[in-house]
Image (cartoon, rainbow, N blue to C red):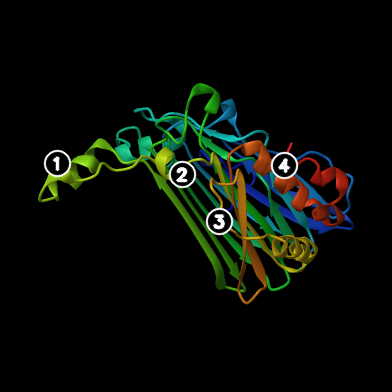
Amino acid sequence: MSFAAGESIPVGTGHIICDLHSSNVVFSKLSSSYPLKLLSPRVSEHGVAIVYVMSYGGGLVGGDCMQLIVEVGKECKLLLLSQGSTKVFKTRAGNRASTRFRRSSSQPTPSSLQAITTQSMEVTIAPCSALFLLPDPVTCFRSASYTQVQSFHLAGSASIVLLDWVTSGRRSMGEDWDFLRYYSVNEVFVEGRRVARDVLLLENPSLDTQTASESCSSNPTSRAPLRMLKDRLAPYSCYAMLLLYGPQTHGVVTDLQAKYRTISIFKRAAPERFIWSLTPVDDGKGTVIRVAGVDTDDVKNWFREVLRGLEAVVGIDEYRKAFL
């Protein structure tokens, strides 16, 4: 996707292209349209740039559709951050402005497009470059439906730190995994070869699902009711996946491996408030960390601490803009 100067940008799309000039990262393209908003503050660290990926109004409404393309030039280090959690509001019927691109007013919007909030991101990372995708977690409100698809294409010497996490909703409002559906897909390719694919589907059973399940049973009265998400995911209110790959992540991965070796496994009377695991991928060239916590702040503080080694890669002040 590329837009010429003066050409209108399709609704809900964004494009980031950065390259290294002398010791500074320069954006040859930084464009976006409602409801997507991109902001890049000035940074002091050489070879590093930050872009905040945000939405107007502080969140996304059912039917919003956003598409972002990112191209990280050779020897650049790009941090993609957010300002606060990505809020996904309750699904409402209607024809959202962000769903009307490439569609005439005479054509009705399909109900599936109205209901589901979607975000897609496609990233290309050049040799000796790195992307640090460290957003705040996604928070789906009651009755929200959200789909996210992200793909990352790395050169052989490129690096990536990818964080994808979700919370149970607005706990202060009594919400506890009360959204309709959360679907997230992350794929990482190195020199065209897929090295990792992570898929997370969280879906509450609907009344239609319950009815269909009972109709397929020879004895519906004896069939156990379908369990809600809050019953299956308890006691945790935050789940996260962190993927690290490439030479610029080696220091952090080494520290994580040492930390993981100190964990003792034994039977407990009750679930721990915080748990995590470490899994090597692609013959140890990459690492996947999975985390679950009773409190989202515990998860955030843990990530802030274990990733502190990135200060040596992107700069102390730049790293501290994440996990605020």
Asked whether the residues under the numbered discs 3 and 1 touch, taking CB atoms below 8 Å apart as contact, a structural biologist would say no
Q: Is residue 200 above or below residue 63?
A: below
Under mark 3, the amino acid is: Lys
For disc 3, the neighbor class at 10 Å (few under 14, some 14 to 19, many from 20) is few
Residue occupying the far bottom of the picture: 283
Query: Mark 4 or 1, which is nearer the eye?
Result: 1
Which residue is more in the foreground, 145 or 123? 145
Between disc 3 and disc 4, the foreground one is 3
What residue would you read off at disc 4?
A: 301
Tell me the mark number nearer the camera, choosing from 3 and 2. 3
Mark in front: 3 vs 1 = 3
The residue positioned farthest toward the top in the image shown: 173
Write the residue at 14% across / 44% down: 220
First in sequence: mark 3 vs mark 1: 1
Would residue 2 appear left or right of 298 to someone viewing this image? Answer: left
- Left or right: where 94 falls relative to 121: left
- Around disc 2, counting alpha carbons within 10 Å, would you say few (fewer than 14), some (14 to 19), or many (20 or more)? some
Q: Say left or right for 224 vs 92.
A: left
Q: Position of residue 98 (x, y in %)?
A: 47, 35
Badge 1 vs badge 2, beta-carbon distance below 8 Å = no
In the rendered structure, which disc, 3 or 4, sits on the residue that comes first in sequence?
3
Q: Tell me, for residue 233, which label it has, or none.
A: 2
For mark 1, what is the residue? 221
At mark 3, the secondary structure is loop
Question: Label 2 is placed on what type of residue?
Answer: Leu
Task: Kindly identify the amino acid type of the residue bearing the numbered disc 4.
Answer: Asn
User: How far apart are the two marked residues, 2 and 4, measured between alpha carbons?
Assistant: 21 Å
Q: Position of residue 31 (x, y in %)?
A: 64, 42
- Does 92 sit left or right of 324 as displayed? left
Check whether the beta carbons of the residues at disc 4 and disc 1 lie within 8 A of each other: no
Q: Which residue is mark 3?
A: 267
Closer to the N terminus: mark 2 or mark 4? 2
